[in-house]
């Protein structure tokens, strides 16, 4: 196969604060940074996460999102909220997953391992 996943890119109007949120949540470190694009490293075996500056506001549910796997969903949801996430309801089954939004309003899920 000639392709591999390089980056998952998150749009944000304030890339620095959103990158800081994701770096703290996932234990990532900044690999490269400019005013427009911040690249986070999650380790060699994982794709890189990037935050890119956009000027338009988020107006609807994202068409793609991250599912984060946790051994203890409640603990990780609490930690994400302390870091700046908020719970949201998009019609999901709360027994199966917790849906949150990052500081830029992008949805992500925390699910059981």
Image: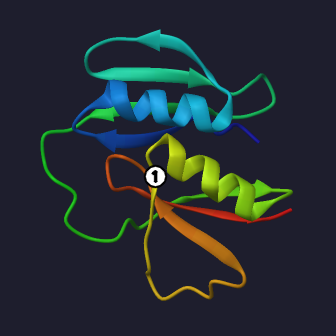
Q: Where is residue 83 in the image (x, y as percent from the top left)?
A: 50, 41
Residue 101 location, quadrant: bottom left
Residue at image position (63%, 58%) is: 77
- The x and y percentages for residue 40 are 55, 23
Q: Which residue is drawn at 54% across and 15% down?
A: 30
Which residue shows up at 44% across the image and 80% down it?
89
Q: Is residue 43 above or below residue 92?
A: above
Q: Is residue 50 above or below residue 33?
A: below
- Image quadrant containing the C terminus: bottom right
Q: Position of residue 67 (x, y in %)?
A: 65, 60
> What residue would you read off at disc 1?
85
- Using the rendered view, name the quadrant where residue 12 is placed: top left
Quadrant in which residue 75 is drawn: bottom right
Q: Which quarter of the rendering shows the N terminus?
A: top right
Return the x and y of residue 104 as percentages of the image width and height.
32, 47
User: As drawn, is 110 to the left or to the right of 63?
Assistant: right
Between residue 52 and residue 82, name the one nearer to us: 82
Neighbour tally class for label 1: few under 14, some 14-19, many 20 plus, Cα within 10 Å: many
In the drawing, does residue 26 fall left or right of residue 52? right
Q: Is residue 84 left or right of residue 59?
A: right
- Please, which colouring scheme is shown? rainbow
Task: From the viewer's perspective, tell me whether residue 58 is left or right of residue 52.
Answer: left
Q: Residue most toward the left? A: 56
Quick one: SS at disc 1? loop
Q: Residue at x 64, y 39 (%)?
A: 5
């Amino acid at each position: 196969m000639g392709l591999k996943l390089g980056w998952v890119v998150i749009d944000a109007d304030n890339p620095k604060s959103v990158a800081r949120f994701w770096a703290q949540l996932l234990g990532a470190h900044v690999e490269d940074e400019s005013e427009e694009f911040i690249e986070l490293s999650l380790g060699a075996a994982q794709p890189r996460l990037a935050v890119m500056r956009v000027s338009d506001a988020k107006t609807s549910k994202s068409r793609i999102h991250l599912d984060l796997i946790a051994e203890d969903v409640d603990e990780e949801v609490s930690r994400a909220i302390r870091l700046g996430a908020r719970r949201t309801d998009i019609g999901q089954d709360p027994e199966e997953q917790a849906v949150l939004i990052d500081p830029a309003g992008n949805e992500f899920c925390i699910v059981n391992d």
